[in-house]
Image: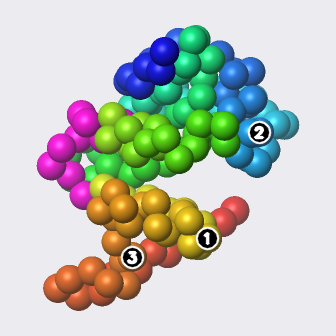
Amino acid sequence: MLIIELAAAEAIEVQEVLDLYHSVGWHAFDHAPERLMQALANSTALAQAREDGRLVGLARVISDSVSICFLQSLATHPDYQRRGIGKALVEKVFEPFPLMVRALITGVAPEQRAFYESLGFIDPEKTLPEPSTVFLRHY
């Protein structure tokens, strides 16, 4: 049975997060799994999807709890994609923050764009009353 719920970082094991992230090609925390768990613990909210106890999806947000909520990451195991789980995770993790600007940064693959646009996100270049943009500085 599939369960999608808000979760505490302490309820999630490091290896199951690494396994999920590896399934979608993410390896940034392989060298520092303790930092991954620190990132989860410092997130404002987490939503998890589990089937029969197995972690099959995870979303996390960072927020000031007043004006903006940033979707930091969303991962759904490839075997569970195209079932509405990603959408449900995004809705669940944003649930505690109903009246805020919701933001994210993602890749440019057409399927990523289509997925987030289907959830109501828009390209900042198309915002009204005037266009906006996103600036990044990598260290």
Furthest toward the right, the residue is 31
Residue at the spot 53% in from the left edge and 12% down from the top edge? 11
Classify residue 84 by image quadrant.
Answer: top left
Amino acid type at image mark 3: Asp
Instruction: State the SS at label 1.
Output: loop
Q: Name the residue at 38% across, 66% down.
A: 117
What separation in Å lies between label 2 and label 3 (alpha carbons)? Answer: 28 Å
Left or right of 106, for residue 99: left
Amino acid carrying mark 1 in the image: Ala
The location of residue 130, given as percent across then percent down, is 23, 88
Q: Nearer the viewer, residue 35 or 49?
A: 49
What residue lies at 20% left-to-right and 83% top-to-bottom?
Answer: 128
The reply to whether discs 1 and 3 touch (Cβ–Cβ < 8 Å) is no
**Magenta stretch holds residue 99:** yes
Q: Amino acid at mark 2?
A: His
Residue at 34% over, 57% down? 119
Lower sequence index among marks 2 and 3 = 2
Judged by depth in the image, the label closer to the viewer, 1 or 3, is 1
Report which residue position mark 2 lands on.
22
Give the percent coordinates (x, y) of residue 137: 60, 70
The correct choice, above or below, for 32 with respect to 28 in the image is: above
Residue under label 3, please give it: 123
State left or right for residue 26 relative to residue 110: right
Residue 124 position in % (x across, y down): 36, 77
What's the distance in space between the residues labelled 2 and 1, CA to CA? 19 Å
Residue 100 is covered by the magenta coloring:
yes
Q: Is residue 18 left or right of residue 81?
A: right
* Residue neighbourhood size for the residue with mark 1, other residues' Cα within 10 Å, grouped as few (<14), some (14–19), many (≥20): few
Judged from the image, the secondary structure of the residue bearing numbered disc 3 is loop
The kind of secondary structure the magenta stretch mainly shows is: loop
- Write down the region rendered in magenta: 93-101
